[in-house]
Image (cartoon, rainbow, N blue to C red):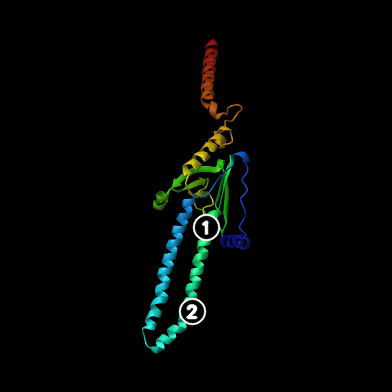
Amino acid sequence: MYQHFRDGCERVLRIPGDPEPPPGDESRTRLFRAAPNFYKYLLLLWAARTFAFVAILFPLEGVPIAAGLASGAKERGLTFLFLPLAVVILGLALVWRIVALAIVRLDFEKRWYLVTDRSLRVREGIVNVREMTITFANIQNISISQGPIQRLIGIADLQVDTAGGGPSHHDKEHGGENLHTVRFRGVNNANEIRELITARLRELKDSGLGDREEVPVSGPPSFSSRGPQVIIALRELAAEASALRKTMEIAR
């Protein structure tokens, strides 16, 4: 049944298939997925939302129905008329929570984290599919974060920030998402991924493809680099010219 639901969602929502790896050496491309415990984490969040939903819905419907049944004949008659509507509402709510559970699983399955020797690509989301590709040359910071529940089940989030990582007007136009940050959510090998990205950043820098200021510039030195030597030479020349002028005046 879930397979039919998944196929239907992929057709209706036009969910892309497996992501293409970003430019780089395909033999060195690494694929990472969210850990199985991340699915349990999502299930826990689904259960909490479902409990909160039921805790609000049942009093709103159960209390009036119970009060109506305990009242007179007229109130009981109105309650019985309202009862089918309440059953329909509860049924729709139950169906929605089941659909939400299937979406949780589909969201878990559709997360992809690709790392090549030159860049990385992250895709997540079902209704709003978010795919980002960043090159290693633009990476400025790599950090790992863990909440209490994440520490308990052994997962973490790896965050990669690029140049211009602060919020901007362009980011606000995209629903407040930071378009300069990508996250490897719910992985159980965050340290391994960080070390892999760090090692490939080091390789990129050693190959001379890093930041421009780190690349040595060949050619003759600029005037600014020879400034002190030029000043000393000019002073010596001025001293010699002054001594020559004094000698000529004495000779006269």
At 45% across and 46% down in the image, what residue appears? 144
Q: Nearer the viewer, residue 178 or 56?
A: 56
Q: Which residue position holds label 1?
A: 105
| Contact? badges 1 and 2 (CB < 8 Å) | no
Q: Decide: few, some or many residues near mark 1? Use Cα within 10 Å; few <14, some 14-19, many ≥20.
A: some
Image quadrant holding the N terminus, namely bottom right
Q: Decide: few, some or many residues near mark 2? Use Cα within 10 Å; few <14, some 14-19, many ≥20.
A: few
Q: Position of residue 59 (x, y in %)?
A: 39, 74
Q: Position of residue 208 (x, y in %)?
A: 58, 33
Quadrant in the picture for residue 74: bottom left
Question: Farthest top residue?
Answer: 251
**Residue 109 visible from this viewpoint:** yes
- Look at the picture and state if 72 lies above or below 185: below
- Look at the picture and state if 31 lies above or below 43: above
What kind of element bears circle 1? helix
- Look at the picture and state if 96 lies above or below 113: below
**Residue 25 visible from this viewpoint:** no
Quadrant in the picture for residue 63: bottom left
C-alpha span from label 1 to label 2 = 31 Å
Tag 1: amino acid: Arg
Tag 2: amino acid: Leu
Q: Position of residue 166 (x, y in %)?
A: 49, 50
What kind of element bears circle 2? helix
Q: Nearer the viewer, residue 103 or 222?
A: 103
Image quadrant holding the C terminus, namely top right
At 47% across and 76% down in the image, what residue appears? 87
At 57% across and 28% down in the image, what residue appears? 223
Q: Position of residue 220 (x, y in %)?
A: 60, 26
Residue 85 has which mark?
2
